[in-house]
């Protein structure tokens, strides 16, 4: 984790670490006993939450590095969707995630919205998935933060325009080289 956090400047190293983290988080079964209360469940949850925080910071700071940013979007999406679907634990993990998004601030929401609207196709799709996961989690926790933030940024209208072009983005994005998330979206078409 410390190397992942501090290694964003060394792009090749950061890419390898992000790929490893992505492979790890996508191989986890969020429905398993790994997240039940107890020492092991708390440790797993804490480490994944820390990875989520690192991913949010990376998305904000990476700028135009599309490949690396897409990896961190995928990690964030998997974390958010996995934690939304975890049953048998309290909503504390979801509340921490929402609070972390609030702490990341409007700047994070702006970056994700910009990527969803005008980013490279792989980032556009990944950003839309993250936004969807954030809205879902907010709805589960009765938090209006995401909807209010999207309304303040006038993103709802932009979203409709973006969705109209998603089939083109999916065609432009190589399914073989893309993430499991994007492959699943393309396969569902």
Image (tube, grey):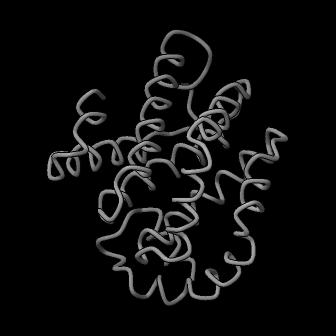
Residue 102, horizontal then vertical, whole percent = 65, 39
Residue 135, horizontal then vertical, whole percent = 72, 54
Q: Is residue 100 above or below residue 185?
A: above
Seen from the viewer's position, the closer of residues 180 and 129 is 129
**Which quarter shows the N terminus?**
top left
Q: Residue at x 70, y 63 (%)?
A: 153
User: Which image quadrant for residue 68?
Assistant: bottom left
In this picture, residue 174 sits left or right of residue 129: left
In this picture, residue 178 sits left or right of residue 139: left
In this picture, residue 158 sits left or right of residue 59: right
Residue 188, horizontal then vertical, whole percent = 57, 77
In this picture, residue 149 sits left or right of residue 121: right
Q: Residue at x 36, y 58 (%)?
A: 69
Residue 28, horizontal then vertical, whole percent = 45, 39
**Which quarter shows the C terminus?**
bottom right
Q: Residue at x 45, y 73 (%)?
A: 119
User: Which image quadrant for residue 159?
Assistant: bottom right
Seen from the viewer's position, the closer of residues 142 and 58 is 58
Q: Is residue 8 above or below residue 129?
A: above
The furthest residue to the top: 39
């Amino acid at each position: 984790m410390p190397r992942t956090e501090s290694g964003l400047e060394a792009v090749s190293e950061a890419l390898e670490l992000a790929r490893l983290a992505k492979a790890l988080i996508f191989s986890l079964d969020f429905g398993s006993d790994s997240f039940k209360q107890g020492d092991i469940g708390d440790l797993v949850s804490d480490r994944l939450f820390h990875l989520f925080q690192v991913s949010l910071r990376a998305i904000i700071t990476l700028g135009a590095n599309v490949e690396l940013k897409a990896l961190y979007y995928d990690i964030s999406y998997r974390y958010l969707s996995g934690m939304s679907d975890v049953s048998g634990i309290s909503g504390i993990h979801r509340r921490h995630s929402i609070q972390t998004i609030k702490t990341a601030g409007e700047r994070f929401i702006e970056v994700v919205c910009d990527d969803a609207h005008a980013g490279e196709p792989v980032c556009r799709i990944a950003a839309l998935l993250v936004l969807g996961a954030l809205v879902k989690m907010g709805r589960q926790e009765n938090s209006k933060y995401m909807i209010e933030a999207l309304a303040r940024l006038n993103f709802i209208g932009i979203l409709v325009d973006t969705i109209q072009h998603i089939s083109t983005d999916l065609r432009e994005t190589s399914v073989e080289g893309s993430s499991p998330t994007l492959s699943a979206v393309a396969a569902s078409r």
